[in-house]
Image: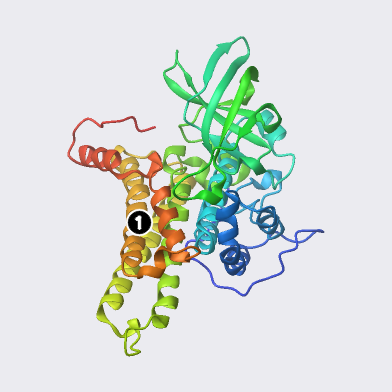
């Protein structure tokens, strides 16, 4: 069995984004070029996206028309036959133009990747289109009861990014007898969206609450338990990353847009700084302060990119080989998810602090990036403290402070 992978970000000219007819599947280079072509479009719409508090319909259509929504879809169901490294290269680029769109893209694509490890029965039901979009609210905040052949669930689940565009919703619940979390897949038609999304940042993600007022039944085949590697999915779909535990892969999609936002902030700071003038007409670009800040932030953002690329290469290589990860390797991947987010926040904050009074005024791009990257870093999967402790304990031979799947 051979597995497709892109180990370095290839360079190519943009190609036609049409997906009709019997065209050959686009290469990773072509998909990346399509993402690059969308960056200025997303940047132009970024203020509108934030004002609407959800990703605009035209942006979703652009992502579909460019073939980018089906990157995570398994080839069996009409995907392009690429793996998570291509998804990463596309995802961080989109976030350069609009952090909220990058977040929406990475999160919804993570669901299509994850679905490839589920049973064939639910995959057949879910992938009625290779461009299917779903949202999630994985925290088990609702009410759930296990019944014969399934679950009864009701209640409220907040933070469901992109739910306005979703056909399905993944909802978290606790399997009490087994002491583990479960994800329950529910059709969008069976939930109510509550427009309560008024956050400090990432406003454009549309991460509204999902409510089920009267209990609905979820059949057991639509209940998913995250955790181990799925070699059977790897072999069925020809995707090496399915040979890795989900805990080593899923958090990458929360780091991805943050790293892209940092890259976007660097470009915006470099564009805007020469235009800023001191009394007497001297450009801020001539000052050592902005030069030093830009250099350090660029180094942090590039380091974050390099670290995630290296991890993705390892994950694909290990998954293809069916390698069993050691505790240290598991902890290292989780450390890097969080550390790259930490680097992205640091890079953006440093530039924002040197951007002057105009940086606090809307629709300043760097103000929006500052809001978005700090909001995204609050997601528990990329929060530093607990995972840093986990890694330190494992490295020192101390009992881990949390479970590692």
Q: In the image, is 115 to the left or to the right of 386?
A: right
Quadrant where the C terminus is found in the figure: top left
Q: Position of residue 190 (x, y in %)?
A: 68, 26
Q: Nearer the viewer, residue 97 or 18?
A: 97
Q: Nearer the viewer, residue 206 or 149?
A: 206
The residue under the point 52% across, 47% down is 240
The residue under the point 69% across, 48% down is 131
Q: In the image, is 125 to the left or to the right of 150?
A: right
| Residue 351 visible from this viewpoint | yes
Q: Nearer the viewer, residue 229 or 299?
A: 299
Q: Position of residue 3 (x, y in %)?
A: 56, 52
Q: In the image, is 87 to the left or to the right of 177?
A: right
**Coloring applied to the structure:** rainbow
Q: Residues within 10 Å of mark 1 (few under 14, many from 20)?
A: many
The residue under the point 58% across, 31% down is 210
Q: Is residue 190 above or below residue 287?
A: above
Residue found farthest to the front: 279
Residue found farthest to the right: 21
Q: Position of residue 89 (x, y in %)?
A: 51, 60
Q: Nearer the viewer, residue 163 or 319?
A: 163
How many numbered marks does the figure carry? Answer: 1
Quickly name the residue at label 1: 345
Q: Position of residue 4 (x, y in %)?
A: 57, 55
């Amino acid at each position: 069995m051979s597995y497709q992978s892109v180990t370095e970000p290839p360079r190519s000219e943009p190609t036609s984004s049409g997906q009709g007819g019997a065209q050959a599947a686009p290469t990773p280079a072509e998909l990346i070029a399509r993402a690059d072509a969308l960056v200025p479009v997303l940047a132009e719409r970024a203020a509108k996206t934030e004002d609407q508090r959800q990703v605009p319909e035209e942006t979703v259509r652009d992502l579909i028309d460019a073939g980018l929504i089906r990157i995570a879809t398994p080839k069996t169901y009409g995907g392009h036959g690429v793996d998570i490294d291509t998804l990463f290269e596309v995802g961080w680029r989109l976030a350069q133009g609009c952090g909220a769109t990058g977040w929406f893209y990475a999160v919804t694509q993570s669901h299509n990747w994850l679905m490839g490890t589920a049973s064939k029965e639910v995959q057949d039901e879910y992938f009625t289109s290779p461009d299917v979009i779903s949202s999630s609210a994985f925290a088990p905040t609702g009410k759930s009861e296990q019944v014969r052949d399934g679950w009864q669930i009701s209640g409220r689940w907040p933070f469901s990014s992109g739910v306005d565009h979703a056909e399905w919703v993944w909802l978290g619940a606790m399997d009490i007898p087994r002491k583990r979390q479960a994800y329950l897949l529910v059709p969008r038609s069976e939930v109510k969206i509550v427009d309560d999304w008024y956050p400090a940042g990432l406003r454009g993600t549309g991460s509204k609450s999902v409510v089920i007022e009267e209990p609905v039944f979820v059949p057991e085949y639509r209940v998913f338990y995250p955790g181990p590697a799925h070699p059977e999915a790897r072999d069925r779909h020809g995707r090496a990353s399915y040979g890795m535990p989900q805990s080593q892969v899923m958090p990458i999609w929360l780091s991805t847009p943050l790293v892209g936002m940092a890259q976007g902030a660097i470009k915006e700071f470099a564009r805007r700084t020469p235009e800023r003038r001191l009394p007497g007409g001297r450009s801020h670009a001539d000052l050592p302060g902005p030069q030093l800040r830009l250099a350090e932030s660029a180094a942090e953002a590039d380091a974050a990119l390099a670290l995630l690329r290296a991890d993705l290469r390892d994950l694909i290589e290990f998954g293809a080989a069916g390698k069993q990860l050691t505790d240290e390797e598991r902890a290292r991947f989780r450390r890097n998810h969080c550390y790259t987010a930490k680097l992205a926040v640091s890079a953006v904050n440093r530039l924002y602090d040197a951007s002057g009074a105009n940086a606090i005024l809307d629709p300043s791009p760097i103000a929006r990036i500052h809001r978005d990257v700090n909001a995204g870093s609050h997601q528990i999967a990329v929060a530093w403290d607990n995972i840093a402790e986990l890694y330190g304990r494992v490295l020192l031979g101390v009992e881990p402070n949390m479970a590692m799947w």
